[in-house]
Amino acid sequence: MREKSLDLDHKTILVTGAAGFIGSNLCLRLLKRTEGARIIGVDNMNMFNPIELKEWRLNYIGEIAQRCSSEWMFREGDISDKEFLDWVMQRFRPAVVVNLAAQEGVGYSIENPYVYMNSNMVGFLNVLEGCRNYPVEHLVFATSASADTEVVQKAFPEEEYGDHPVSFYAASKRSNELMAHSYARLYGIPVTGLRLYTVYGPFGRTDMAYFAFADRLYRGETLSLYNHGETAGILPTLMM
Ligand SMILES: NC(=O)c1ccc[n+]([C@@H]2O[C@H](COP(=O)([O-])OP(=O)(O)OC[C@H]3O[C@@H](n4cnc5c(N)ncnc54)[C@H](O)[C@@H]3O)[C@@H](O)[C@H]2O)c1
């Protein structure tokens, strides 16, 4: 693994999915740890997780930003809207782009594949095109453990994962890795993909197991294990 550190002070950093769990925590961290930077948050504010939670996160970032030397801006919009993303890239010319915007959830992708096609694939292509047309120092994007053959091999047969994804969500994330690879090779864009596992922390997502489990335990209810408690069956739902 190559190590590279970027000085982010006085840089413009675009974070997509900024109202989301990881995006909001990243924006807070960037605000607190940079000097004179400009953090641009973008999010389509979809209703997959409670909108109140997203608004709360954005308000909190706004409050913290008032005490920081770095600047915070938010623009509501969809990364699958090429015109919108072009405008953001042209207007702000970010040095670093962090793409965290994506449609989440394994189960949801069974009923709603087009949402994943639009947000995760068309949206990501727009991000790549933006970085090609308005060159950046670095593009970082979130992929998923579900795209990682080695990890899942420990618990599952290889043929079910990696390049044989069993969910359309995993397929969209694996596609992002391949798309990024080709853009990095073709246009020399410095890209890092992060294969995230189950992430937890403050302001977390209400659809994830740790939240749902804690919520049910708090209310004195029992936990539901999918697939009659066979853990091999529930792992894909945890790996978002
Ligand atoms: N949380 C985890 O455990 C985990 C694990 C693996 C990968 N990831 C990846 O990390 C990234 C962030 O995850 P998160 O947990 O913060 O999810 P999240 O749902 O909290 O945040 C994603 C945000 O993106 C926004 N969004 C979705 N589609 C969009 C679009 N087309 N245009 C603009 N905004 C859009 C949503 O409104 C949401 O606020 C995602 O790419 C996800 O696939 C997360």
Image: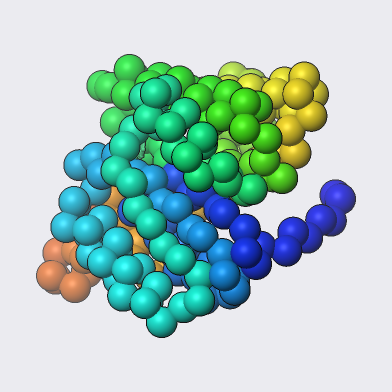
The image quarter in which residue 112 lies: top left
What residue lies at 19% left-to-right and 52% top-to-bottom? 50
- The answer to whether 103 is drawn above or below residue 42 in the figure is above
Outermost residue, bottom direction? 67
Work out which quarter of the rendered image holds the C terminus and state it: top left
Residue 140 is at least partly visible in this image = no
Q: Residue at x 33, y 46 (%)?
A: 75
Q: Is residue 191 visible?
A: yes
Image-based side of 168 in relation to 138, left or right:
left
Q: Quadrant of ligand 1?
A: top left
Q: From the top left corner, tell me how far across and down residue 129 is, in percent.
A: 58, 24
Instruction: Find residue 234 and report its horizontal and vertical position in percent.
Output: 40, 42
Residue located at (56% from left, 64% from top): 37
183 to the left or right of 79: right
Query: Which residue appears at 37% of the width and 77% of the height?
Result: 66
- In front here: 110 or 35? 35
Whether 81 is drawn above or below 22: the answer is above
Q: Nearer the viewer, residue 141 or 71?
A: 71
x%, y% of residue 160?
57, 24
Q: Position of residue 54 (x, y in %)?
A: 26, 56
How are the colours assigned in the image? rainbow
What is the quadrant of residue 140 in the picture?
top right
**Is 211 displayed left or right of 102 in the figure?**
left
